[in-house]
Image (cartoon, helix red, strand yellow):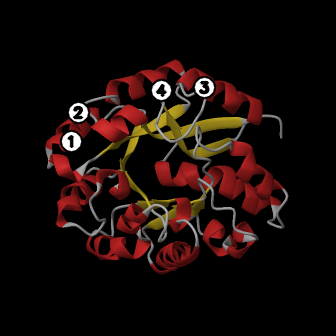
């Protein structure tokens, strides 16, 4: 198959502290996509929008979408410490072709995932048929704030808003968090996982083929922080069938985000 078909369901643009990357803009992302046969990506916020809110960066995300030939779709962001102010900017984005969901990040925003202050965004996502994406991870001795995003903390919201398509980014990280995320994706129809980030778990893709087969597991890289080739190599060399690889690399993201 010579035509690019891969969908990278988890990328970022923009500089951030803590990670060094020389090329972080949408033009660099497009070059990397073209070099690897990636047809489309979903930008889970540029860093300025993720850290400062949708008032900063939403317009540039739509500009990147158009500049890319409508190949780089995007999510807005919601910070619960801003109350419902962020929803005003997300509401303005409704109807834009590139806008496909909302990203929350409990550790960066310092608010536990089970806090009542997230209720407005869960309701907004349900009412507007948007994907809600959250950073998820496991307990971390060197980054204690990761405990704010343990997958189990989301279960109450998943039950309360069954129509919200909820994507657990990073599949809960490693260890206990990963186990919780897999359980939730297996038990609830509206919970999905992506493989973005440094979750290099031996045999993970084959172990989770039941989620691949039910469109619950997506390929994502976490570019610019991670090279897409890391997970692409694991997937291509795995014992998954060709059909399962295609689902993981393309169809599942197209289905979740309703991409063309």
Tell me the CA gap for discs 2 and 3. Answer: 30 Å
Q: Determine crowd level at label 4: few under 14, some 14-19, many 20+ residues with C-alpha closer than 10 A.
A: many
Q: Which mark is residue 65?
A: 4
Tell me the CA gap for discs 4 and 3. Answer: 18 Å
Looking at the image, is mark 2 or mark 3 nearer the viewer? 3
The numbered mark, 1 or 4, whose residue comes first in the sequence reads 4
Q: What residue is at 63 percent from the left and 53 percent from the top?
A: 219
Looking at the image, is mark 4 or mark 3 nearer the viewer? 3
Q: Given the current orientation, which residue lies at the most extreme front position? A: 142
Task: Determine whether 108 is above or below 33 in the image.
Answer: below
Q: Determine crowd level at label 3: few under 14, some 14-19, many 20+ residues with C-alpha closer than 10 A.
A: some
Q: Given the current orientation, which residue lies at the most extreme top position? A: 67
Tell me the CA gap for discs 1 and 4. Answer: 21 Å
Return the residue at label 3.
23
Please identify the quarter of the rendering in which residue 237 is found.
Answer: bottom right
What element does badge 2 sit on? helix
Return the residue at label 1.
86
Question: Percent position (x, y) of residue 123?
Answer: 22, 59
Question: Percent position (x, y) of residue 257?
Answer: 48, 49
In screen coordinates, is 21 left or right of 185? Answer: right
In screen coordinates, is 96 left or right of 40? Answer: left
Q: What residue is at 36 percent from the left and 40 percent from the top?
A: 50
Task: Determine whether 17 is above or below 107 in the image.
Answer: above
Tell me the CA gap for discs 2 and 4. Answer: 16 Å
Return the residue at label 2.
92
| Cβ atoms under marks 3 and 1 closer than 8 Å | no
Question: Percent position (x, y) of residue 222?
Answer: 57, 46
């Amino acid at each position: 198959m010579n035509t690019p078909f891969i969908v990278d369901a988890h990328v970022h643009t923009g500089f951030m502290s803590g990670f060094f990357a020389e090329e972080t803009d949408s033009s660099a992302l497009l070059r990397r996509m073209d070099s690897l046969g990636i047809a489309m990506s979903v930008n889970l916020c540029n860093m300025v929008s993720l850290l400062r809110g949708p008032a900063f960066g939403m317009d540039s995300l739509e500009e990147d979408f158009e500049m890319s030939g409508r190949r780089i779709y995007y999510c807005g962001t919601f910070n619960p410490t801003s109350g419902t102010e962020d929803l005003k900017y997300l509401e303005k984005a409704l109807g834009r072709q590139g806008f496909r969901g909302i990203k929350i990040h409990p550790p960066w925003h310092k608010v536990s995932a089970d806090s009542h202050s997230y209720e407005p965004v869960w309701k907004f996502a349900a009412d507007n048929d948007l994907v809600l994406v959250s950073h998820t991870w496991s307990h971390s001795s060197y980054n204690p704030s990761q405990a704010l995003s343990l997958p189990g903390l989301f279960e109450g919201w998943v039950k309360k808003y069954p129509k919200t398509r909820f994507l657990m980014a990073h599949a809960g990280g490693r260890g206990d968090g990963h186990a919780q995320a897999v359980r939730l994706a297996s038990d609830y129809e509206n919970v999905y996982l992506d493989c973005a980030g440094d979750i290099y778990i031996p045999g993970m893709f084959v172990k989770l083929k039941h989620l691949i087969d039910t469109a619950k597991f997506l390929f994502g890289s976490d570019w610019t922080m991670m090279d897409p080739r890391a997970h692409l190599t694991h997937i291509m060399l795995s014992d998954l069938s060709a059909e399962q690889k295609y689902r993981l690399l393309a169809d599942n993201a197209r289905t979740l985000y309703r991409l063309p």
